[in-house]
Image: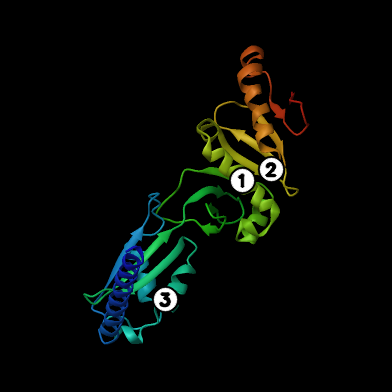
Amino acid sequence: MKWKLNIRREVKVTVALLIISFLIAFSERKMEGMVCKDIVIELDNAHENHFLDEADVLKLVEGSGQSIKGTSFSRIDLRAIENKLKLDKHIRDADLFGDLKGNLVVNVKLRRPIARIVRSDAPDAYIAEDGVVMQVSDKYTSRVVLVSGAYAKQLIEMGDLNEKEEGKNLMKMIEFINADKFWRAQVAQLDINSEGKIIIFPQVTGQSVEFGKAENMEAKFRKLMIFYKEILPTRGWTKYGRVNLEYEGQIVAE
């Protein structure tokens, strides 16, 4: 009896797969002869980053160089439009497809910024959560940690922080700060010199924190927490102008 049940189950699965394949083939044939009536923008923006809105995406689609409305779906190169949309660094992913109503559906996912690169001699930029460097927007400013200093130019030139080990380490440090409620509120700015050494400028206390390179982060932040919780309350919040965390097992304050 058991083998009979298995055969029946396999037959049911095979029939279901055949039905699904038929429906997909039928839909594809129907879409091939269908003319695009309208463009529908679906903006997947879970983090509420308003660098682009539906009108901006529609403008990019309509500026793709292809005739869309009134054109048969079989003659529209959806992959080319997707690739063009992804050239905008604010866009992490784009998926285009036609629905049964004759609409071209454009589903776009936006990147989330985690830090802002600030420069006095050139335009600012954002570092996205996947490491991509993207331009700022006139429409929206994200409240994130600032990154400044001579190293900012190198970050812009990287384009993607995952391309170099120094960039990956900086990403880990920013992610560490953003993941902790206290450090997210306390760390206002990371100033990085040409050698990659970091000075933290805090939000509340007045000391500059010489962090060194983005290495051994957890140990350094533990020392900084000791400085805030045990040293400053007893010695005075304005006694020290700077604190150095670079030396292993030591906190140097002046």
Of pointers 2 and 1, the one earlier in the residue sequence: 1
Q: Which quadrant of the view contains residue 215?
A: top right
Q: Is residue 19 left or right of residue 170?
A: left
Q: Position of residue 234 (x, y in %)?
A: 64, 12
Q: Identify the image quadrant of the C terminus.
A: top right
Residue flagged by tag 3: what amino acid is it?
Ile
Q: Are marks 3 and 2 in contact (CB under 8 Å)?
A: no
Query: Does residue 70 appear in the picture of this structure?
Result: no
Q: What colouring style does the render use? A: rainbow
**Residue assigned mark 1:** 172
**Residue assigned mark 2:** 214
Q: Which quadrant of the view contains residue 30?
A: bottom left
Of pointers 3 and 2, the one earlier in the residue sequence: 3
Establish if 234 lies above or below 159.
above
Establish if 1 lies above or below 187.
below
Task: Farthest residue to the right: give it.
Answer: 247
Q: Secondary structure at mark 2?
A: loop
Q: Are marks 2 and 1 in contact (CB under 8 Å)?
A: yes
Q: Identify the image quadrant of the N terminus.
A: bottom left
Q: Position of residue 63 (x, y in %)?
A: 39, 76
Task: Farthest residue to the left: give it.
Answer: 101
Establish if 175 lies above or below 88.
above
Q: Position of residue 251 (x, y in %)?
A: 74, 25
Between disc 2 and disc 1, the foreground one is: 1
Foreground: 144 or 168? 168
**Residue assigned mark 3:** 81
Residue flagged by tag 2: what amino acid is it?
Ala
Q: Secondary structure at mark 1?
A: helix
Residue flagged by tag 1: what amino acid is it?
Lys
